[in-house]
Amino acid sequence: MEAASAEKHTVRVLIADDSPTVRLMLRRILDADPGITVIGQAGNGREAVEKVASLKPDLVTMDVEMPVMDGIKAIEQIMAYTPVPVLVVSSVAAEHTANAAKAMGAGAVDVFCKPGSASLDEFEAKANTLRNKIKLLSRVRVIAHPRGRFATAASAPRPVHPGATAEVVAIASSTGGPQALNVILKSLPANFHAAIVIVQHIAEGFTDGLVEWLGGNCRMLVKKGRQGDDIVPKCIVIAPDSIHMIVSHDHRIALVNREIDSPHKPSADVLLESVAQEYGARSLGVILTGMGRDGARGIQAIHDSGGHTLAQNEETSVIFSMAREAIKLNAVENVIPLEQIGPAIGSYVF
């Protein structure tokens, strides 16, 4: 669902965290913005579920590790019965990052690293980023998202593309992407006859947790991209933090630090353009839910090189901006619901 029109109003926020210190810190950060009002606090997941129902906030900041009911279960309950944008605010400690990814799989729209010890300038920069993110995400129109809402992709009708032989599937995703990737990747068989490369925009420090979570849910190997890794079938490679990932001329993963006209690093455009250049008609580009336009130019490159392209439709997207930008370029062959993307990918590969 696309972000609603920008009508000026105060964003009403509920803070859920079991630490009184963290709740106080977040409240002070948010109170510094006259466009944000903290309307309540919760010390555990059950209390968060109850306060969402009674206070009807515009957005919830949600910790993952909490007593009584953890953040993942709380998000499942909220998204099933009283849907509201949920921003996971979590530590990047190794034991928390996979759970943050699970929380996004349950319906949270994004993840943000808890502000920690840093210089005053660094802390204020991070606080400002958090305030801006909250104001932006509060306008996202979310839908009920209980577990099992999407039918298993294997049961969806399977389109047929005679002679299609995609060797590499390149996927671009952003806000709402982790849950979309989970639906798609877990539908693919262990003997999938192509490689998959992905750029998912996510807060720095959370890629390892995303890789671990997705790897535990699907039948293929999921790993973070490393310099020189071979690109092989039955393997899913996710771009690491803070560096661009490309496909090199010898069909290996390359990590590059080039500066481009984009706020995203890694950039989906950079990856997809390299796939178009190296694989051409043997490539498949997929653009999913997300904010902004990163990936649209890359989808166009794949389309122009003779490859195939798919986009997630608006009805099943958290935010439709990225896919819409690709569609506006006349670069997308098929715009389909999330639950049909896995079977569609298979039809281009087998």
Image: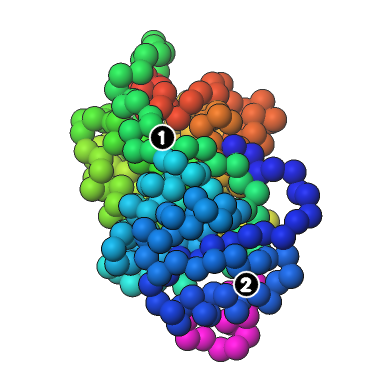
The outermost residue toward the bottom is 119
Give SS at disc 1: strand
Prevailing secondary structure of the magenta residues: helix
Classify the position of the C terminus by image quarter: top left
Question: Which residue in the protein does label 1 denote?
Answer: 169
Q: What stretch is highlighted in magenta?
A: 116-128
The picture places residue 109, in percent across and down from the top left corner, at: 50, 50
- In the rendered structure, which amino acid carries the disc numbered 1? Val
| Left or right side of 86 for 150 | left
Where is residue 303? Give x, y as percent: 57, 28
Residue 259: quarter of image: bottom right
Residue 3 counted in the magenta span: no
The image shows residue 156 at horizontal and vertical percentages of 35, 18
Give the residue number, with chain letter if any, for mark 2. 30
* Residue at horizontal 37 percent and vertical 14 percent from the top: 157
| Residue 240 in view, yes or no | no
Q: Is residue 122 left or right of 182 when viewed as pictured? A: right
Tell me what residue is drawn at x 68 percent, y 30 percent. 329
Where does the image place residue 179, in percent across and percent down from the top left? 41, 43
Q: Which of marks 1 and 2 is nearer the N terminus?
A: 2
**Residue 182 in sight:** yes
Depicted 1 relative to depicted 77: above or below: above
158 on left or right of 325: left
Q: How crowded is mark 1: few (under 14 residues within 10 Å), some or many (20 or more)?
A: many
Q: Which amino acid does label 2 sit on?
A: Leu
Q: Which of 206 and 193 is in front in this view?
A: 206
